[in-house]
Amino acid sequence: MANIAGLQNALVDVFIRLRAKQGVPTELTLDLDATDDPVHVDQLGKFFHGYYKSYCYLPLYTFCGDWPLGAVLRPSDIDGCAGTIKELARIVPKLRAAWPHVKIIVRARSAC
């Protein structure tokens, strides 16, 4: 069985390793976004979301440029920003350990 935390952390670890080949970054921008993942059959955890007008999940994605640093599948009966702080608390310390002086900008949609 896959270790979800290990897979999530691997995304950040690989990003750090690949980005380090380009030199020490002075600035990183983390983009967080919640969006719909439509459900087409009767699946556990499905809920109707009024904004998307469908039954769906509401995953939270974290990117740095084109690189995914996190993807959390969530039910859609939650606030769009739910889990944002937890994701940042997982990702930022790893980035700080690699690059202690890097400026980290966090961008998120209004729901995050």
Image: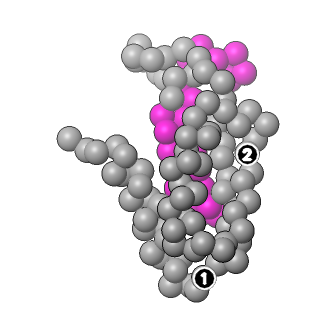
Residue at the left extreme, as displayed: 1
Q: Check disc 2 and report the residue beneath it.
A: 108
Frontmost residue, 50 versus 20: 20
Within 10 Å of disc 1 (Cα), the crowding (few <14, some 14-19, many 20+) is few
Q: Is residue 54 visible?
A: no
Residue at the right extreme, as displayed: 110
Q: Which stretch did the figure color magenta? A: 48-73
Q: Check disc 1 and report the residue beneath it.
A: 24
Q: In x, y percent, where is residue 30?
A: 66, 57
Frontmost residue, 48 versus 98: 98
Q: Is residue 22 visible?
A: yes
Secondary element at tag 1: loop
Q: Which amino acid does label 2 sit on?
A: Ala
Frontmost residue, 23 versus 95: 95
Say above or below: 7 vs 53: below
Q: Residue at horizontal 36%, vertical 51%?
A: 7
Q: Residue at horizontal 69%, vertical 63%?
A: 104
Q: What residue type is labelled 1?
A: Val
